[in-house]
Amino acid sequence: MLKCLLYTVFVFFITISFSRAAGRQTHQPVRFSDPVFEKVLVKKNLVYNENPSAGIKAKYHRFDFYEPEADSSTARPLIIWLHGGGFKFGKKTSGGLPLWSKTFAARGYVCAALNYRLSKKHPLKHFEDLVEGCADAVDDVNNAIQFFKNNCSQYRIDTNRIILGGNSAGGMIALQAVYSSRGDMARLIHRGNSTGPAIYNPQHIAAVVNYWGALFNADWLKHAQVPIVSAHGSRDRIVPYDDKKPPLVGSLAIHRIADSLHIPNSLKVFEGYTHELQKRFNPFFAGPAAKIRWSVAGQFAAAFLYEQLFRQH
């Protein structure tokens, strides 16, 4: 009886001590790492390319812009978010794009959720069409980046801190935009102009957020030293998270090779989950549990970006 009483008193004092310590060490939210703004403003259906090539629908060059309300900063980091859908489906409001755009804007970023051209061919069946669709999307993203640089005062953007992020096909676009070139992709599939000069990371992207995406060629990681943060389900069969099923080089292989090349990078593996961090992949309905995992991936990426781009070392 006495032992039980002493144990109870011990647990009580330990609990009180931890509570007091927690009270003394209350975490103060840090901009770019934590949510610091209560409200986010969204401007929808803006246009980043008012003169598209003939035959390209205007909707493919629209974006939604997210920014924190009552933010007085004149130069804010921009994340351009790119949706998934295998280069055949999807739009700027698909999947996790609204969630990540809102939560990163609440941290002090500005975010642009982009539409880009979708393939008229068969990218879900033929690798050559997949690569060609990605190359076209990279061209659109480069146009969007140039638009934001040209209008940086209006949108109050720090042009030295533009980040590309996306899920699935969007992650692939972000990776290829930095670590590949149109010539590289043309040579890979023997299509298009493969003789042009290879210029890597022409827009000087500061970092890449890769959610369950992939590179087309592991050797392309030698082309730049841009930080990469990835998240991927270990049971993903749509975009394998390793490189055991060529020609896609998934997030685990990217992490391993980037480490060997001393590229700043980090990977969060969601053990047992499939594509889009779902238990069983459903392209039409993710469910609340998957959205919670998307939020966890967002916080993981935010911590990495803060360490790489904002913390004073």
Image: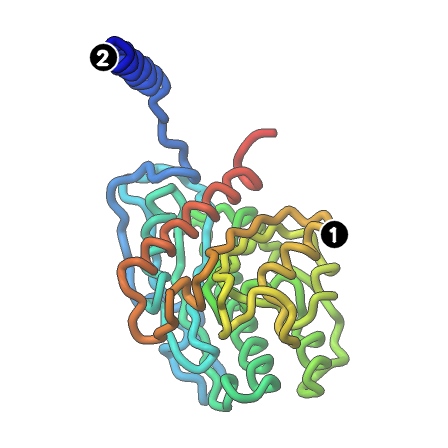
- Residue 103 badge: none
Q: Residues within 10 Å of mark 2 (few under 14, many from 20)?
A: few
**Amino acid type, residue under disc 2 in the picture:** Met
SS label for mark 1? loop
User: In percent of the image, x 48 and y 41: which residue is there?
Assistant: 303
129 over 243 or under it: above or below: below
Q: Residue 6: where, in percent of width, then height?
A: 28, 10
Residue 296 versus residue 163: which sits nearer the camera?
296
120 over 280 or under it: above or below: below
Q: Which residue is mark 2?
A: 1
Indicate the quadrant containing the N terminus: top left, top right, bottom left or bottom right.
top left
SS label for mark 2? loop
78 over 246 or under it: above or below: above
Q: How is the image coloured?
A: rainbow
Q: Which residue is mark 1?
A: 261
Q: Residue 288: where, in percent of width, then height?
A: 27, 59
Q: Nearer the viewer, mark 1 or mark 2?
A: 2
User: In percent of the image, x 51 and y 62: which residue is there?
Assistant: 234
Q: CA distance from mark 1 to mark 2?
A: 62 Å
Q: Residue 5: where, in percent of width, then height?
A: 23, 11
**Amino acid type, residue under disc 1 in the picture:** Leu
Residue 241 versus residue 100: which sits nearer the camera?
241
154 sits left or right of 269 in the view = left
Tell me which label, 1 or 2, sits earlier in the chain: 2
User: In percent of the image, x 52 and y 85: which residue is there?
Assistant: 123
- Residue 16 makes an appearance in the image: no
